[in-house]
Image (cartoon, rainbow, N blue to C red):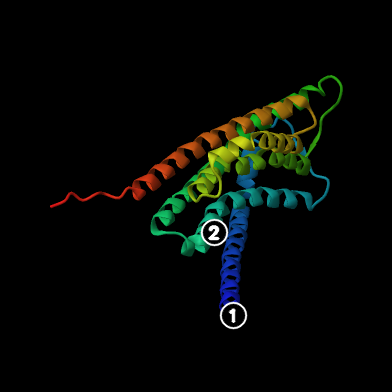
């Protein structure tokens, strides 16, 4: 009983250490990004043909921290993934350690890909559609805070959602899920993805469709990757169970 308690305490202590390292990395990155935040701000509004209003002296500071926060999240992802890997490493075999470690660069790459998709594809489509509704009816004015909140709400979720394929591959490789389970959960997954799309987009059907369709495609792509990983895993396990028969001398 005491050994179990000591083991639990050790695990909690190790988890605490990994969380602290990740948080320190995030804080370091957010202040590092803040140094270049003005340049990032100018780049983000380069195509905006209107001025952004500021309602108070602290609003622009809040906008800068929002932008720095997104940059810090992107840079912290590989650190967080590596710390997670270090935490679970003692329970993995040597081969599993190499396989799981290889997923870390993919997490960062897919997060940046998701952000890019949200910013360069979804965001301009939704923004232009909403602005078209006000033509001849309203004079549209943007505050800096609302503009960047709108941008981040549309782009940041895609960074996390694009992690789905590699997370599915990882969980399949360690046996937590399999393609059969994903296929059975397809209806529920579609329902949850639809709710997510409705939650992160403005209240219009066009915006919802522009987000829902890529999410469904992403899920099906994840199922396909899970099948590939699962087949390779089963094949390796079957090869291990084959015992060579020695010929009689």
Question: Alpha-carbon distance for marks 2 and 1?
Answer: 26 Å
Residue at mark 1: 2
**Which residue occupies 60% across, 74% down?**
9
Q: Residue furthest front?
A: 248
Question: Which quadrant of the figure has residue 112?
Answer: top right
Residue 36, x across and y down, in percent? 59, 50
- Answer few, some or many: residues within 10 Å of disc 1's Cα (few below 14, many 20 plus, some between 14 and 19): few
Query: Between 25 and 10, which is closer to the camera in this rendering?
Result: 10
Query: Between 135 and 55, which is closer to the camera in this rendering?
Result: 135
The N terminus: image quadrant: bottom right
Q: Is residue 213 above or below residue 154?
A: above
Q: How many marks?
A: 2
Does any portion of residue 105 appear in the rendered image? yes
Residue 136, x across and y down, in percent? 84, 19
Of the residues tagged 2 and 1, which is closer to the observer? 1
Residue at mark 2: 84
Task: Report helix, strand or loop for mark 2.
Answer: helix
Does any portion of residue 108 appear in the rendered image? no
**Which residue occupies 82% across, 49% down?**
56
The answer to whether the residue labelled 2 contacts the one labelled 1, judged by CB atoms less than 8 Å apart, is no
Question: Which quadrant of the figure has residue 163?
Answer: top right
Mark found first going from the N terminus, 2 or 1:
1
Residue 131, x across and y down, in percent? 77, 26
Q: Is residue 97 above or below residue 9?
A: above
Query: Between 172 and 243, which is closer to the camera in this rendering?
Result: 243
Residue 219, x across and y down, in percent? 59, 35
Q: Is residue 110 above or below residue 35?
A: above
């Amino acid at each position: 009983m005491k050994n179990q308690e000591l083991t639990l305490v050790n695990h909690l202590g190790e988890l605490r250490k990994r969380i602290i390292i990740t948080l320190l990395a995030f804080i370091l990155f957010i202040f590092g990004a803040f140094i270049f935040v003005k340049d990032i701000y100018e780049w983000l509004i380069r195509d905006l043909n209107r001025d952004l209003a500021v309602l108070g002296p602290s609003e622009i500071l809040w906008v800068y921290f929002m932008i720095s926060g997104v940059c810090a999240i992107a840079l912290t992802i590989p650190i967080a993934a590596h710390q997670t890997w270090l935490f679970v490493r003692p329970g993995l075999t040597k081969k599993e350690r190499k396989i799981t470690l290889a997923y870390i660069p993919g997490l960062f790459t897919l997060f940046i890909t998701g952000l890019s998709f949200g910013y360069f594809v979804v965001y301009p489509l939704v923004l232009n559609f909403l602005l078209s509704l006000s033509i001849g009816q309203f004079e549209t004015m943007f505050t800096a805070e609302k503009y960047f909140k709108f941008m981040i709400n549309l782009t940041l979720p895609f960074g996390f959602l694009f992690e789905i394929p590699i997370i599915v591959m990882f969980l399949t490789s360690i046996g937590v899920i399999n393609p059969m389970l994903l296929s059975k959960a397809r209806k529920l997954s579609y329902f949850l993805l639809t709710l997510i799309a409705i939650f992160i987009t403005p209240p219009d059907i066009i915006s919802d469709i522009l987000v829902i369709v890529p999410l469904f495609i992403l899920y099906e792509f994840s199922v396909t990757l899970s099948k590939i990983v699962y087949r390779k895993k089963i094949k390796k396990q079957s090869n291990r169970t084959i015992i060579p028969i020695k010929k009689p001398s």
